[in-house]
Image (cartoon, rainbow, N blue to C red):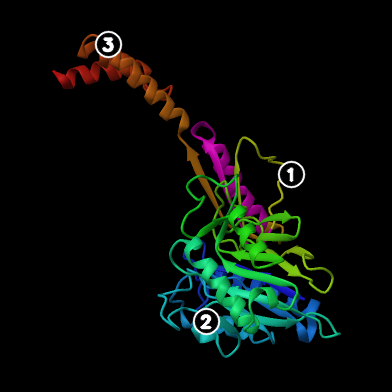
């Protein structure tokens, strides 16, 4: 049984970090607990034959503090077979060993170049092949086919048509895009369109693809294969539209059951919840995760009410003994004010004189009800002489 996790992003994040102790703050400890949970799940399902694959970005920065490296070493040392792809956040440069994962080589198999590992998947000695391709800079369609050719050679030294037909999984650190991906992410250097990926899967007879890098969790099922963006094990920010940052998934591949048999579990850990104040259920909202971070977007006329609710949420969380709220944030949507400002500008452009333009603008500009517009207009006219 092979467990895949991605984008752990171990770091002492400053925002909502909490107190520092022995070189670790509260947010770092929460992420490390999630990584320890992944290790425990892998061992519970696979025992001595368990394999844990980390699909890149184990660390959030290429130069993590020694305390973070040591904490990760202690956790991974509990597992007999850990494979780590070097991700773009881990990497200082493409030079050998110039990355954050290099100190972990005593407790893990750190993958710096395309390679293959054969792993045992059942008691009767059946095995599967993991094609491991770490992050590489540059357009992915230029280097990924070459990397897969290198994997095919390293698998057994035989041509593709003579490779043994064992279940085969490709492990990469790259985003997978499809028709629902925002245009600014689709076909970027570090991503591959799912249709192009499927063609490579067919060419190299790959049963499954497990990808890190993008934090969303998504799965694509083909007639003879599966591609999965595993998603961030420990999300570290509020999600934009293309992510699902409130999850922490583990993907468990069971090739002994079937070449595309995959189970997904949601690991406990930091969660980032984002919603609009006008659309949430104020009475029954359940904030999951520990710690949980909540960000509300409210119109300017709702901001005071929303801020009071967020403050009460944090206080009540502590009073009930379920102090899982790690931080709250209010984002004020100034859309109404911007729309009124555009209207005022439009009104001013319709005037035939400067004085008329000024009068039109003041009458249409966004002001609170307490402000007397005639007084504002008179004051501006005095200043203009």
Give, as a single range, the part of the protein colored magenta. 289-318
Q: Position of residue 113 (x, y in %)?
A: 52, 78
Q: Secondary structure at mark 3?
A: loop
* Residue 294 to residue 203: above or below: above
Q: Quadrant of the C terminus?
A: top left
Q: Which residue is mark 3?
A: 351
Q: Which residue is mark 1?
A: 284
- Judge whether residue 22 can be spotted in this image: no
Left-right relation of 356 to 241? left
Q: Which residue is mark 2?
A: 69
Q: Secondary structure at mark 2?
A: helix
Residue 305 shown in magenta: yes
Distance from Cα at disc 2 to Cα at disc 1: 40 Å
Where, by quadrant of the figure, is residue 248 drawn?
bottom right
Label 1 Cα neighbours within 10 Å, binned few <14 / some 14-19 / many ≥20: few
Distance from Cα at disc 3 to Cα at disc 2: 66 Å
View extreme (bottom): residue: 106
- Count the marks: 3
Where, by quadrant of the figure, is residue 5 drawn?
bottom right
Closer to viewer: mark 1 or mark 3: 3
Left-right relation of 381 to 57? left
* Residue in view at x 47 percent, y 63 percent: 142
Distance from Cα at disc 1 to Cα at disc 3: 52 Å
Q: Are marks 1 and 3 in contact (CB under 8 Å)?
A: no
* Residue in view at x 69 percent, y 67 percent: 205
């Amino acid at each position: 049984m092979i467990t895949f996790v991605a984008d752990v992003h171990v770091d002492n994040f400053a925002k909502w970090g909490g107190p520092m102790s022995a070189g670790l703050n509260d947010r770092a400890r929460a992420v490390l607990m999630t990584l320890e949970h992944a290790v425990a799940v892998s061992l519970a399902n696979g025992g001595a034959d368990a394999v844990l694959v980390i699909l890149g970005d184990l660390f959030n920065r290429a130069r993590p503090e020694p305390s973070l490296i040591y904490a990760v070493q202690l956790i991974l040392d509990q597992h007999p077979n850990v494979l780590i792809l070097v991700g773009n956040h881990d990497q200082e440069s493409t030079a050998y060993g110039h990355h954050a994962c290099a100190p972990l080589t005593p407790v893990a198999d750190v993958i710096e170049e395309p390679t293959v590992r054969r792993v045992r998947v059942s008691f009767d000695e059946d095995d599967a092949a993991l094609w491991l391709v770490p992050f590489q800079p540059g357009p992915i369609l230029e280097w990924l086919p070459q990397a897969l050719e290198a994997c095919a050679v390293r698998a057994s030294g035989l041509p593709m048509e003579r490779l043994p037909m064992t279940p085969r999984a490709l492990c990469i650190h790259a985003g997978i895009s499809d028709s629902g991906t925002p245009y600014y992410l689709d076909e970027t250097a570090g991503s591959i369109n799912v249709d192009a990926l499927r063609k490579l899967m067919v060419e190299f007879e790959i049963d499954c693809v497990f990808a890190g890098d993008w934090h969303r969790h998504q799965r694509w099922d083909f007639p003879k294969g599966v591609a999965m963006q595993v998603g961030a094990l420990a999300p570290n920010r509020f999600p934009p539209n293309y992510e699902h940052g409130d999850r922490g998934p583990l993907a468990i591949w069971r090739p002994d059951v079937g070449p595309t048999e995959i189970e997904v579990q949601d690991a406990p850990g930091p969660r980032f919840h984002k919603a609009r104040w006008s659309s949430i259920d104020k009475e029954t909202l359940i904030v999951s995760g520990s710690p949980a971070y909540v960000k509300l977007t409210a119109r300017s006329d709702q901001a005071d009410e929303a801020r009071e609710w967020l403050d009460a949420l944090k206080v009540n969380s502590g009073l009930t003994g379920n102090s899982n709220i790690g931080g709250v944030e209010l984002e004020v949507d100034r859309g109404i004010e911007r729309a009124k400002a555009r209207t005022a500008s439009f009104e001013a452009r319709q005037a035939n004189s400067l004085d008329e333009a000024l009068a039109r603008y003041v009458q249409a500009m966004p002001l609170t009800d307490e402000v007397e517009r005639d007084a504002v207009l008179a004051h501006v006219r005095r200043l203009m002489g």
